[in-house]
């Protein structure tokens, strides 16, 4: 029996930035609220995690890729 391993498709790109004021960091988390979406870097998601989890109806968390090498740097 063969098992296929499918590569997980990423939602965020290197161009996505954190929505926290004055934060130019790459976004790794999208929090979806009834009023819209907010993008967060790892630091700001950690800082506001309790509130985000309480208020968001969906969270896309790609922090597992923070230290992953891109295909272009292979």
Image (cartoon, rainbow, N blue to C red):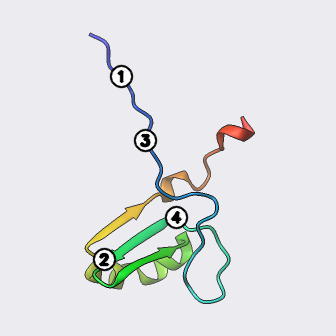
Q: Residues within 10 Å of mark 2 (few under 14, many from 20)?
A: few
Disc 3 target residue: 8
Name the side, left or right, on which 66 lies relative to 58.
Answer: right
Q: Is mark 3 in CB contact (under 8 Å) with mark 4?
A: no
Q: Position of residue 60 (x, y in %)?
A: 39, 62
Give the mark nearer the N terminus: 3 vs 2. 3
Q: CA distance from mark 1 to mark 2?
A: 33 Å
Q: Residues within 10 Å of mark 1 (few under 14, many from 20)?
A: few
40 versus 6 height, above or below: below
Disc 4 target residue: 28
Q: Residues within 10 Å of mark 3 (few under 14, many from 20)?
A: few
Dot 4 falls on a residue whose secondary structure is loop
Name the side, left or right, on which 17 lies relative to 53.
Answer: right
Q: CA distance from mark 3 to mark 2?
A: 23 Å
> Looking at the image, which residue is at 57% across and 76% down?
18
Q: Nearer the viewer, mark 3 or mark 2?
A: 3
Numbered tag placed on residue 53 in the rendering: 2
> Looking at the image, which residue is at 34% across and 85% down?
51
Labels in figure, total: 4
> Looking at the image, which residue is at 68% across and 77% down?
24
Give the mark nearer the N terminus: 1 vs 2. 1
């Amino acid at each position: 029996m063969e098992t296929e391993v499918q590569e997980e498709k990423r939602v965020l790109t290197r161009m996505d930035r954190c929505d926290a004021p004055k934060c130019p960091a790459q976004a790794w988390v999208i929090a979806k609220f009834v009023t819209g979406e907010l993008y967060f870097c790892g630091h700001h998601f950690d800082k506001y995690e309790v509130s985000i989890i309480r208020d968001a109806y969906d969270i896309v968390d790609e922090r597992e890729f923070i230290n992953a090498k891109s295909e272009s740097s292979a």
